[in-house]
Image: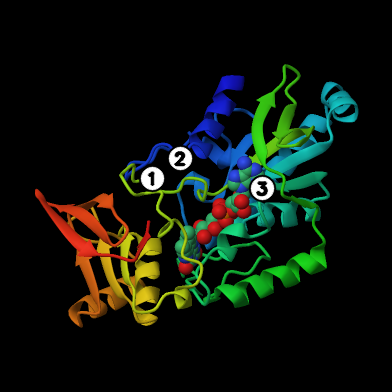
């Protein structure tokens, strides 16, 4: 049982697996994992959209509140609560999913805590400045009071902070969870870096996927010009930039860098783009047609040097002038 929980963390923290294939922990019904009492919500479940994350965070609490009520109804469980646990539920991660779970946990009068390794809404904070957040899918409505609307990153964060200011949630920033153990009495021990463990009856893992940054495993990957995150496209002008990938995140970085006046090339392993958000697909096609953006499909980055980057395209090496790599 212990090793199973630790295996999740190993997978999440060690950037593994890399590349296009991703394996997700097995989730049974109602967000519960193979381990009774351990729930997964948000990006970690494989649905990388804010609306799903807020919806799942909200819904998982209803399930947990019901279970806790049933458990507390038995004398044995009630004894455990009073003697061994600090919290009904420990929520790991203060992103869209974790915050929505905390808002609902407060409403349900649960004893909860949110443990966040970085800052509240860290993933959104790391979006490029001015990024427009798409509130997709339009057919889904989230019951969470954490708003997800089509708005810039900055306006979204302002709206979120307003809700958090009103609700005064119990959140520990800078609390990185290093492991979780399920003890023989069924209580979870949450191991926190440089802090004492805490104990909870239920765990919600809402840690997203930001720890799983792409690794190319090639020469030059550690050069200072190579970055995982594009904080502000305005920091770049008249640069030769290679963006690696063909998903929405890579596309949005590439489009933003074109718009701030750079010479941008996308390197993508696949032969075409798949399932892009419609607005991204339209703009990408337009920029490619207007020669503002170059997309090299069926390509892989081979080596990165100070002023160039070499791709393998089909069976040939192609070297391009390069100042920045975004992966
Ligand atoms: C560049 C980019 C653009 C995107 N654009 C859109 C968009 O336009 N529309 C949309 O709907 N979605 C978009 N997404 C997806 C959206 O950001 C995610 O779906 C959403 O953030 C998922 O929420 P989450 O709570 O599951 O995870 P996150 O928001 O990633 O939150 C997870 C939190 O857990 C914390 N954490 C991780 N490990 C630990 C640990 N060991 N201990 C404690 N805390 C930990 C992290 O620091 C983080 O704050 C985009 C994503 C990216 C990367």
Callouts 2 and 1 close, C-beta under 8 Å: yes
Q: Is residue 229 left or right of residue 146?
A: left
Quick one: SS at disc 2?
A: loop
Decide if residue 49 is in sight here: no
Callouts 1 and 3 close, C-beta under 8 Å: no
Residue that mark 2 sits on: 15
Q: Tell me how far mark 2 sits from mark 3, CA to CA.
A: 16 Å
The quadrant of the picture occupied by the N terminus is top right
Residue 192: percent from left, percent from top:
72, 36
Disc 3 residue lies near ligand 1 with CB under 8 A: yes
Residue that mark 1 sits on: 215
At x 49% / y 34%, what residue is drawn? Answer: 11
At x 31% / y 44%, what residue is drawn? Answer: 218
Image quadrant, ligand 1:
bottom right
Quick one: SS at disc 3?
A: loop
Q: Is residue 86 above or below residue 259?
A: above
């Amino acid at each position: 049982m212990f090793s199973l929980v630790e295996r999740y963390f190993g997978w999440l923290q060690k950037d593994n697996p890399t590349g296009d294939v991703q394996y997700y922990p097995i989730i049974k019904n109602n967000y519960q994992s193979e381990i009774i009492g351990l729930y997964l919500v948000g990006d970690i479940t494989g649905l990388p959209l804010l609306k799903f994350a807020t919806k799942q965070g909200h819904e998982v609490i209803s399930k947990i509140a019901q279970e806790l009520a049933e458990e507390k109804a038995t004398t044995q469980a009630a004894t455990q609560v009073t003697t061994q646990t600090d919290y009904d539920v420990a929520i790991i991660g203060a992103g869209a999913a974790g915050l929505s779970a905390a808002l609902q946990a407060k409403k349900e009068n649960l004893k909860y805590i949110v443990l966040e390794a970085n800052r509240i809404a860290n993933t959104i904070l790391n979006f490029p400045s001015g990024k427009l957040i798409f509130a997709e899918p339009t057919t889904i409505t989230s019951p969470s009071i954490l708003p997800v609307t089509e708005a810039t990153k900055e306006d979204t964060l302002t709206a979120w902070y307003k809700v958090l200011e009103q609700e005064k949630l119990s959140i520990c920033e800078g609390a990185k969870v290093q492991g979780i153990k399920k003890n023989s009495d069924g209580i979870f021990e949450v191991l926190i870096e440089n802090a004492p463990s805490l104990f909870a009856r239920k765990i919600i893992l809402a840690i997203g996927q930001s720890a799983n940054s792409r690794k190319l495993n090639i020469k030059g990957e550690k050069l200072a010009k190579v970055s995982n995150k594009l904080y502000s496209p305005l920091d770049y002008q008249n640069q030769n930039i290679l963006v690696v990938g063909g998903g929405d995140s890579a596309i949005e970085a590439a489009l933003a860098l074109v718009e701030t006046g750079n010479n941008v090339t996308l390197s993508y392993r696949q032969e075409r783009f798949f399932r892009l958000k419609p607005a991204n697909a339209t703009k990408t096609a337009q920029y490619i047609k207007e020669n503002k953006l170059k997309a090299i499909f069926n390509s892989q980055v081979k080596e990165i040097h100070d002023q160039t980057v070499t791709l393998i395209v089909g069976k040939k090496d192609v070297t391009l002038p390069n100042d920045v790599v975004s992966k």
